[in-house]
Image: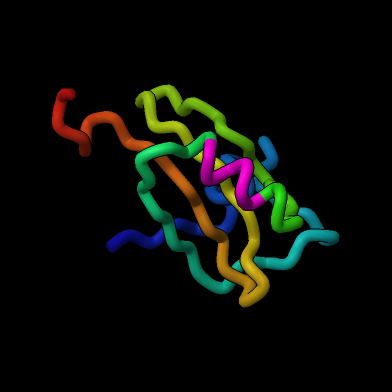
Amino acid sequence: FAIWPLDQAAESCFGSGEWPADVVRPQAWLEFDVEDVDAATRELEERGYRLLVRNRTEPWSQVVTRLISPEGLLVGVTMTPWMRKPA
């Protein structure tokens, strides 16, 4: 569980502390950690979702794609290396 203030989410998604007026303001934030973030991102694009962030590697090595869901949620699709067992 975490709370992510909107200004921090805006900075992460858009590089600015202000959420853009032309993008739906999220009412909540949810992330899904997946095995293959590239494949999940492709599927989201094929289904017509507008991605805010596409397969970006964060400084802590997590790879993230973000979008606004039809319900108004800020959704992250991630691959978090330290949450996985070594192969």
Quadrant position of the C terminus in the picture: top left
Residue 65: percent from left, percent from top: 56, 42
Residue 50: say if magenta: no
Kindly give the residue lying farthest to the right in the view shown: 22
Residue 42: say if magenta: yes
- Assign the magenta stretch its main secondary structure: helix
Residue 28: percent from left, percent from top: 50, 70
**Residue at the (38%, 61%) spot, across then down:** 3
Residue 11: percent from left, percent from top: 61, 42
**Residue at the (57%, 58%) spot, across then down:** 6
Is residue 6 shown above or below 83? below
Residue 84: percent from left, percent from top: 20, 35
Is residue 85 shown above or below 69? above
Is residue 4 shown above or below 78? below
Kindly give the residue lying farthest to the bottom in the view shown: 71
Q: Which residues are magenta?
A: 39-44
Q: Tell me where residue 42 sits by quadrant.
A: top right
Quadrant position of the N terminus in the picture: bottom left
**Figure coloring:** rainbow
Between residues 32 and 13, which one lies in front from this camera angle?
32
Report whether 72 appears left or right of 2.
right
**Residue at the (70%, 48%) spot, across then down:** 45
**Residue at the (15%, 32%) spot, across then down:** 85
